[in-house]
Image (spheres, helix red, strand yellow):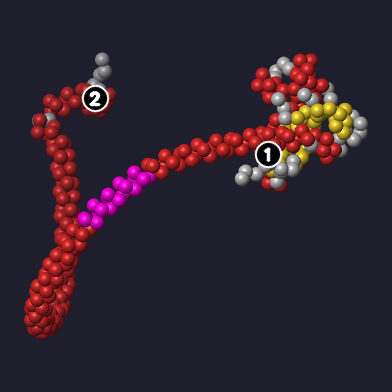
Amino acid sequence: MTAIDNIQDFIRVLDENPDWLEEIRVRVLTRELLGLPQVVMELAASHVRLENTVAELAASQVRLENTFQKFVETTQEFMQTTNRRLGALEASQARLENTLQKFVETTNRRMDALEASNARMDNTVAELAASHARLENTFQKFVETTNRRMDALEASYVRLENTVAELAASQVRLEGTVAKLATLQETMNEDVGVMKGHHASIQSSKHAYAMAFRHGFQLKQTLSQENIWKILNDADTSGISRDDIVSFSVADLIMKITDSDGVDCYVAAEFSYTVDRGDTRRAIRNAEFLTRFTGLPAHAMVAGVKVTDRVKRRFIDTKRALWYELPDRIPQAD
């Protein structure tokens, strides 16, 4: 245990043992004295707050004085502005009174003019009423005249309907007559076509030698239908339709010829009074069949009575088919 001989030893022991010091302070000092430091600290903090409050009040006082000063200045400026506006308002009111006076005077003049115009309008309305009465009389006369004309038109329309009915019946009779004439014309055209075709066939047969000579060939033989069927029977016709074979067998004219070089070949000719594109196609096809069936060269030829330049351009392929023009000696009808 530590020995305590003097006050210094006691103080040293207290310094070494803070809890002893605190226990002695509690026993020696009263509670009021113990709480005094806390009270002093609170007073100091309160004093600081008081100083801050006083400073804020002083600053607020300064701001209030500045605001009041600005208020005074603003009030003075407002008074000056208000005085100026009141002066301008008084001047504007004076001008408005003058303008109103002029408006009243102008309105009075216009009212006077309007009253005079109204009087003239009354006179005009009276004149219009009289004119309207005259117009009603005129219109009444027009209605009466129109009614008379409509009655006449209705009577004329009835007569016209009767005439149209008669014309309709006549039209029916005429259409029947025209139909008969059309049938007769068609029959005549067919008869003439047969005559023209027969004429072309006769001319082509007569001109076989001339047709060959015209193109530098020498006619050796004109093939009969029996000769043509002999060629067909000996040939390979696979892949060719029966219709094309029959059409080939009744070709208008097939000639066996010798060309300018002495080579044997054939000419497949189609003829018509008026040549068309079908004649050219058949002649070219028949020439191709002859080459296929016989192995000899073959030429296509188109012959006709009416072989104009336009027909040659439109219907004859001059690069693949020859052409020959037959003389026109068909008998003319009385």
Q: Give, as a three-letter code, the residue at label 1.
A: Tyr
Q: Earlier in the sequence, mark 1 or mark 2?
A: 2
Q: Residues within 10 Å of mark 1 (few under 14, many from 20)?
A: many
Q: Of 154 and 263, which appears nearest the observer? A: 154
Q: Tell me which secondary structure the magenta stretch mostly adopts.
A: helix
Q: Answer left or right for 105 relative to 158.
A: left
Res 42 seen here: yes
322 above or below 292?
below
> Based on the displayed image, in which of its 4 quarters is residue 190 positioned?
top right
Disc 2 element = helix
Q: Of 288 and 227, which appears nearest the observer? A: 227
Whether 266 is among the magenta residues is no
> Based on the displayed image, in which of its 4 quarters is residue 212 positioned?
top right
Residue highlighted by disc 1 = 273
Q: Residue furthest right?
A: 262
Q: Answer left or right for 89 relative to 236.
A: left
Distance CA(mark 1)–CA(mark 2) = 156 Å
Q: Quadrant of the C terminus?
A: top right
Q: Residues within 10 Å of mark 2 (few under 14, many from 20)?
A: few
Q: Position of residue 237 (x, y in %)?
A: 73, 17
Disc 1 element = strand
Numbered range of the magenta stretch? 154-171
Q: Mark 1 against mark 2, which lies toward the viewer?
A: 1
Q: Position of residue 175 (x, y in %)?
A: 41, 42
Q: Answer left or right for 138 relative to 191.
A: left
Res 318 seen here: no
Residue depicted at x 65% and y 21%: 243
Count of numbered tags:
2
Q: Position of residue 177 (x, y in %)?
A: 44, 41
Q: Quadrant of the N terminus?
A: top left
Residue highlighted by disc 2 = 18
